[in-house]
Amino acid sequence: MESGNHDIFTGTIENGSEHLYNKDLAPATERHWSVYSLFSMWMSDVHSIGTYTFAAGLFFLGLTGWQVLIAEIIGAFAVFFLANMTGTAGTKLGVPYPVLSRISFGVFGGNVPAMIRGFIAVFWYGIQTYLSSVAVVAILLLVFPGMKGMMGTTFLGLSLPGWIGFLFLWLLQFLIFRYGMEFIRKFDNFCGPAVYVMMLIMIAWIAVKAGGKINIGISPVRVAPGQAIFQFFSAISLVIAYFSTIMLNVSDFTRFSPSTKTTKLGNFWGLPINFTAFSLASVIITAGTITVFGKAITDPVLLIQKVNNPFFLVVGAIVFIIATMGVNIVANLVSPAYDFANAAPKHIDFRRGAMITSILAVVVMPWKIYGSPVAVNYFLGGLGAFLGPIFAIIVVDFYLIKRGKVNVKSLYQVGSDHDYWYKNGYNMKAFIAFMIGIIVTVPLALVPAFSIVSPFSWPIGVAITGIVYGSLMRREQVVVQTEPGTPTIQ
């Protein structure tokens, strides 16, 4: 552990309630995640088919490549600042996101924001697994052309080769996950760099096909100058909302960091530096497709299929499969594993939480969700609407109300003599602020009449909920009184 970090909690929890405590939810004692480990974690989160498609899809807001890139850079720095808030809190306390949420919502109330994040992750886990399985099916059809005849045979809306690809990835991801967080760290260390090699190859290929004539100053959609300015700020807000899930639960990873300095450096290299580099590559490649094919191709798998080289197709598909597994495990499996464990610590540990997530990801039939534009829009729109208010409550409470002073032991104990019991384990002020926040943000995000402001549902939710929660808590300031010798993190 680095010197000067006496505020990092490394103690043990005694007399923890079986309803709140197990070894996976306990404060981390082994902290081996270096700057590069956290950098790799962010690379795994960023380097995916979904992020590539998102970054490239901002072209269709009517922005040029330069405008898209600048918006993404500004958004990345905003995410970096926000992720440091929850990330450094996780480092200081050593606790995962659902335990962190107990500080503001109450030891039992913390289950509500945890389960909201958990169920969102279940859907994303299924969708990302399905997207990767498309690449697996492409390889199967290339190696076994006879399987094309099976594409017409479907069960629950998915073809037989589709089921083979989906279940193959489903099992592979779970096998990786069951070895624990240390193995995930090593897996992440490999995933991110592998994708950069593939991206450089794609840039070289599209540059040759375009004869070197790649103009990132063009856009496939023309809009008025005034509208372009509005869309520019919409793009910045969308970048922040896109990372709203991992910003909440980044403490699941930073809890293993040895110091806040390590956490901030890892976040810096992983967010503004890495996301900018990945976005630049996505913008260049997408602008190149406009030159070569006359239209923007935002799906990297579809672009690889246009190479007409079986070897390149297989290698490219494998790289993107690895990349998507990386982001899926980081963003969509670790979080719900902790979230479900938090709901019943006595019966559910980290691995059982992962199994529940994996099973539910099949039950929700993600291929049907992804195949319905309406369902996808409502799902994505709801992300910022719910997660923004939760983020506001956690951050306002930790930094402005508690001022970073947290009784770690009380996060695992029940009874009115403990700091985060509030009323029967629930902080009703947090829930009042949350309800007021989503009453405003959900209509903004999902009702078509408010579509012009829907990209801003996350910051609007943060602002409104933060002000309401801060006002409610200031009226009855919680004074944390600790027992002699009880660790209070400052």
Image: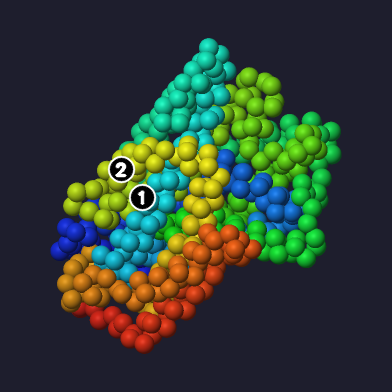
Measuring 73% from the left and 31% from the top, which residue is drawn there? 205
Residue 87 is situated, as x and y percent measured from the top left of the image, at 44, 61
Measuring 76% from the left and 43% from the top, which residue is drawn there? 287
Camera-side residue of 476 and 10 = 476
Picture layout, residue 243 above or below residue 214? below
First along the sequence among labels 2 and 1: 1
Measuring 39% from the left and 62% from the top, which residue is drawn there? 90
User: Could you tell me if residue 107 is visible in this image?
Assistant: yes
Q: Residue furthest bottom?
A: 475
Q: Residue furthest front?
A: 449
Are dots 2 and 1 in contact, CB under 8 Å?
yes
Residue 476 is situated, as x and y percent measured from the top left of the image, at 33, 86
SS type, badge 2: helix
Displayed quadrant of residue 31:
bottom left
Camera-side residue of 291 and 261 = 291
Camera-side residue of 334 and 129 = 129
Asked if residue 201 lies left or right of residue 244, the reply is right
Quarter of the image where the N terminus is located: bottom left
SS type, badge 1: helix
Q: Amino acid at mark 2?
A: Ile
Q: CA distance from mark 2 to mark 1?
A: 9 Å
Q: Which mark is residue 356?
A: 2
Measuring 27% from the left and 71% from the top, which residue is drawn there? 426
User: Could you tell me if residue 328 is visible in this image?
Assistant: no
Residue 410 is situated, as x and y percent measured from the top left of the image, at 24, 70
Picture layout, residue 473 above or below residue 125? below
Asked if residue 398 lies left or right of residue 49, the reply is left
Displayed quadrant of residue 10:
bottom left
**Which residue is label 1 attached to?**
336
Instruction: Categorize mark 2 by other alpha carbons within 10 Å: few (<14), some (14-19), many (20+).
Output: some
Picture layout, residue 129 above or below residue 145? below
